[in-house]
Amino acid sequence: DGSRVVAAILFEATMDREIGGVPSAQFLWEEKRVVPFLKIDKGLAEEKDGVQLMKDMPALDDLLDRGVAAGIFGTKERSVIKHFNQEGIKAIVQQQFDVARRVLAKGLVPILEPEVDIHASDKEACERLLLDLLLEGLAQLAPEDWVVFKLTLPTQPDLYLPLMQHPCTLRVLALSGGYAREEACKLLAQNKGMIASFSRAFTEGLQDEQSEKDFSKTVDASCEVIFQASRGHAASASSGLHGGA
């Protein structure tokens, strides 16, 4: 619930479902005090200039309207930087802010997710250019436009502090990006102000053949570890997780 989880990112189909007879987004907020976000991108385009932009979203306005009607608070849109290329990274940031403005126009809060591949040989250079371009994009927003960033854990700890200090930044989230959960939590704890928005690291240890009890126990332990890392407590990054969890 909201004691450890700030928000949940829903797929479109999940948004359209009900939980106990209550629409999903409404249930999350009213029953769990968890803020509902909606994934709006349609996947990644083929790599060009070292990056993968988002695929075209011809029905975006309709999806955003449905999200508003369903009680969605904000959106999430992902693209990926594979290698250092100035033009490619500029295109990534431009597209992210273009989509963000359309989201903001509907009264929603966008999560901009320009992921940097953790295996990029020039990862740190990508991150430094990305930071500069994101700050430029923020400078073009109106004072009332609030955005969230979801970013790869940076090579240099606290690299993204300038983003957090901007008045248009609501939160800066960390994505796990393929790091194992323990490593992701250690890195997260080194970055003041960032909180986790892990997917791959969060589901680590979950298996189809688990009983409902073991599944729930693994989810709870994973949640606690990541929650503590978001508070800056890396020492507890493996507590409560044993065996395949």
Image: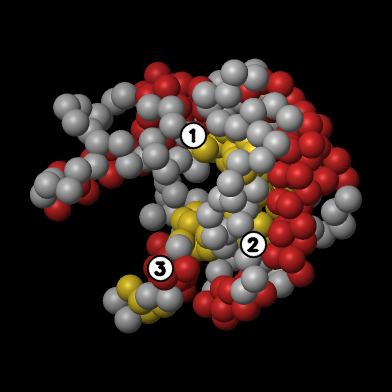
Q: Is residue 24 above or below residue 233?
A: below
Which callout, 2 or 3, points at the residue further toward the start of the chain?
Answer: 3
The residue lying at 33 percent from left, 73 percent from top is: 19
Which of the numbered marks, if any, corresponds to residue 47?
none
| Residue in the foreground of this view, choosing between 12 and 44 | 44
Dot 2: what SS? Answer: loop
Q: Which residue is mark 1?
A: 177
Which callout, 1 or 3, points at the residue further toward the start of the chain?
Answer: 3
The residue lying at 24 percent from left, 42 percent from top is: 206
Q: Residue 102, percent across and down?
A: 74, 66
Location of residue 194 (image quadrant):
top right
Mark 2 residue crowding within 10 angstroms, few (<14) / some (14–19) / many (20+): few
Which callout, 2 or 1, points at the residue further toward the start of the chain?
Answer: 2
Q: Residue 126, percent across and down?
A: 69, 27
Q: Which residue is mark 2?
A: 56
Which of the numbered marks, if any, corresponds to residue 14?
3
Residue 69 is at least partly visible in this image: yes
The residue lying at 62 percent from left, 78 percent from top is: 62
Q: Is residue 212 above or below residue 12?
A: above
Amino acid found under the numbered disc labelled 1:
Gly
Residue 228 is at least partly visible in this image: no
Q: Nearer the viewer, mark 2 or mark 3?
A: 2
Dot 1: what SS? Answer: loop
Q: Residue 222, percent across and down?
A: 32, 38
How many marks can you see? 3
| Residue in the foreground of this view, choosing between 135 and 20 | 135
Q: Is residue 114 above or below residue 125?
A: below
Question: How far apart are the two marked residues, 2 and 3, measured between alpha carbons?
Answer: 21 Å
Q: Is residue 168 above or below residue 134?
A: below
